[in-house]
Amino acid sequence: MLANTLPLIIAAMVFSLTSLTANSESAPSQPDTLTTQVQSIPHYVTLEAKLEAIKQSTVSAQTQGIVEMVNFDINDKVEAGQVLILINSSQQRASLSQAKAALAQAQALNTDAQTILKRNHSLLTKRTLSQGEFDSSLARANSAEASVLAAEAMVKQAKEQVSYTRITAPYSGIVRQRFVQMGELVNPGQPVMTGFALKPLRAVVDIPQKLATKLSTQAKLDNNLIHIIANGKHYPASQFTLFPYADSRYSSIRARIDLADSDDTQGLIPGAWVQVQLPSGQQHGIYLPASAILQQGEVASVLVMQNQDYKLRYVRLGQTQQDGRIRIMSGLEAGEQVAIDVLAAAMSAAVNKEAL
């Protein structure tokens, strides 16, 4: 019955192509076929996920002072090292000057103490100075030297306090929130801004407990089997992290999937919804390339070689795989010959029937 309908379907398929082959003296070559076989490929589960920035942080003040300048506001783009907020540094600079003065004083006392120690050592060798007096001068010299080290540390600390008056961006990104205004007094530890970097990104997904248990029992999960789907593209994962606890409200376990950093992720932004494909075992079935399948509305068919002739066979299609092949749910068995290019096979059959 199906074979009787083949000429009608073939005629409809090649109607628009016959004008191109009407003057051809030689018939097209016999199209290639493939032998169907049951194959085992990874089965995927697709889940909804949300992108978030891996680098997101709150910048806080590390010194006390009055805010003199706020250089960026919400949604502004900043580069790493740019000054976000400038704090009045008069108090910090005064402390630095005081520390430098204390260092100069300690250095002067240390120079005097070292000179006295050297002179006393010479007197000691000539036996014109008692051992007790020499020990006292040695102790004073060591104390003066330690005072210089302490003063140098104070200068270093004062310089750091001055540098804290310039709050800079730790990385390039976007300002999300601003917590202070110009003229406000800020204290150490007080948040001033939050922000995030546009790259790198990761997807946060809630995985059903049954699938999460299967993933956690695998010795090593291949990141190449995990994909993030957005804007019609598949993006590979660089790292998969499964949380060690479950959310009892939704009977799920959260996971983070880091995107591999590449130029292809330029169009992805934090907060966007994407899809995540996770492996959930092996799937057995017959798979054909899309070129071997004739799709007419909701009806799909293939051309099967039987007795040196093509016969039309209706099939039921399954999920399309990442490599473009389509799973055949029913209508074919292993070991059958199927035309790889259904259009080429239809044209060949039409020419052969016309020749007869």
Image: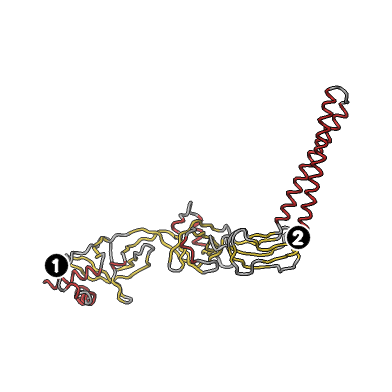
- Residue 170: where, in percent of width, then height? 62, 58
| Residue at image location 43% in from the left, 59% down from the top | 281
Q: Secondary structure at mark 2?
A: loop
Neighbourhood count class around disc 1 (C-alpha, 10 Å): few under 14, some 14–19, many 20 upward: few
Q: Picture quarter containing residue 94?
A: bottom right
Q: Which is more N-terminal, label 1 or label 2?
A: 1
Residue 83 drawn at (x, y percent)? 65, 61
Q: Where does residue 286 sit, x and y in percent of width and height?
A: 32, 63
Disc number at residue 64? 2
Numbered disc in front, either 2 or 1 = 2
Q: What's the amino acid at mark 2? A: Gln
Horizontal and vertical percent position of residue 25: 13, 69
In the image, taking residue 278 as reference, residue 244 lies left or right, namely right
Label number found at residue 26: 1
Could you tell me which quadrant the C terminus lies in? bottom left
Residue type marked 1: Ser
